[in-house]
Image (spheres, rainbow, N blue to C red):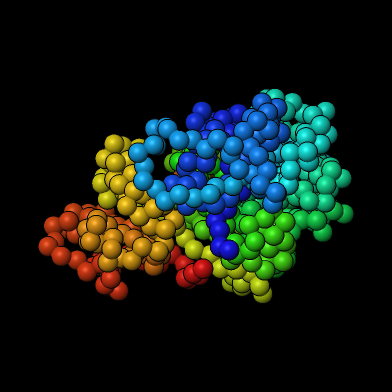
Amino acid sequence: MRYIADLHVHSHYSHATSKDLSLESLYQWAQIKGIDIIGTGDFTHPQWFQELQTKLMSDGSGFFRLKEPPQNSALSDLKHQGRDVRFCLTTEISTIYSHGNQLHKNHHLLYAPDLETVSKINTKLAGMGNLNADGRPILRLPARDLLEIVLEVSDRAYLIPAHIWTPWFSTLGSKAGYNSIEACFRDLTAHIFALETGLSSDPVMNWKLSALDCYTMISNSDAHSPQKLGREANLFDTDLTYNAMFEALKTRQGFLGTFEFFPEGGKYHMDGHRKCGICLDPTATQAYKGLCPVCSKPLTVGVLHRVEELADRPQPRQPEGAPNFEYLIPLPEILSEIKSASPNSKVVQQQFWQIIGAFGNEFTFLRKVPLEDIQQHLGQVFAEAIRRLRNQQVCLTPGYDGLYGTIHVFQPGELQQLNGQRSLRATNANPPVAAAYSSKDTYQI
């Protein structure tokens, strides 16, 4: 069966996360988004692990059900389509250590098939860092040794390097990473079968490195609030079991690809210095010798630059067997642009709930609802916005140095023009403003 999985999220025990990140809210928002398998996040945190033990029950497949799904809540009047949401036991670990006379800071995703395995992992890790301090604990041990611990506990527990290009905390990042996966995991590299691309990169960027051809590229939301679920996710066609899902990641059989945030929208896509408002492409950074042209301090080298630095292909080449992917923009952000209001504003939120109530969930609406139906229910401008999204006709201002980029489907002033017209054919292949453009070649799932 086909299902969508978001396998990197957090709980309210992680730093800088929403207090609303409970199992109940994750369950509800997975239904709203259209997600079938959701990570628990943070299983190393003692209090969160206790909640997992109390509130979840095994479904016999390696996934878990919520024992008491919420019936009455702030979302109780929402008429979304019912979805049998399952949980996968997950956590993120930060390892900080010296190796080869260099300080490394790597983030990793861990997965386990049952609570007993989680308990064993937690027992081994408890002596290597304070698991109570953060839902994403900091451990003073090499990434290679963390992988060894996971492998010793269970051959069904897995480690996947997280957001591999992020400058400060990743396996290949510019500030504290390595130049290869092999340099990080050394003699245990063969046990790494998948990599998480992160919000600031996409599969096309990773296809410029032949060294990554053997790894399956996955994408997840890394949600720090329940509303951010599904901004990136994975599409499978397998039996709905833990073993089948990970076998698909190992073999690429049954893994259909990913839903991607436009990488320009990520916080570290380009080089730059946020304090000085400086955003540069790799060529400009090299011209300035890596220093901010305003204050002369080192620039934060972003994901695009780092990929180009390690790439051995002038153009991306999709590896044999590698699945395709599809770009999405979160629905509240599209509504925010159309309504000229904040994504959290009352007018945007009201429209969002109306759409979910009418069409079932966010993934279905953005990807599958016919444009004619959208035009009938929401008007011509909205249908045109969704048409452009599906055709990757977007306007991008890239993010840098911790600042998110912006993604728009209309150019400045264009909405006023369209709203002033009496009619607009939502399926017109040529948008009325010629400068609307496709950012990349189309790779559709």
Give the left or right position of residue 290, taking residue 381 as reference. right
Question: Residue 432 falls in which quadrant of the image?
Answer: bottom left
Q: Residue at x 58, y 34 (%)?
A: 11
Q: Position of residue 236 (x, y in %)?
A: 59, 62
Q: Residue at x 65, y 34 (%)?
A: 52
Q: Nearer the viewer, residue 122 or 389?
A: 122
Q: Nearer the viewer, residue 278 or 233?
A: 233
Q: Residue at x 52, y 41 (%)?
A: 27
Q: Is residue 85 visible?
A: yes
Q: Nearer the viewer, residue 403 or 47?
A: 47
Q: Position of residue 346 (x, y in %)?
A: 29, 36
Establish if 344 lies above or below 390: above
Q: Quadrant of the N terminus?
A: bottom right
Establish if 444 lies above or below 381: below
Query: How many numbered discs sit on the rendered protein?
Result: 0
Q: Is residue 180 visible?
A: no
Q: Nearer the viewer, residue 157 or 208?
A: 157
Q: Position of residue 431 (x, y in %)?
A: 27, 68
Q: Residue at x 39, y 48 (%)?
A: 80
Establish if 346 lies above or below 209: above
Question: Residue 415 falls in which quadrant of the image?
Answer: bottom left
Q: Position of residue 434 (x, y in %)?
A: 28, 69
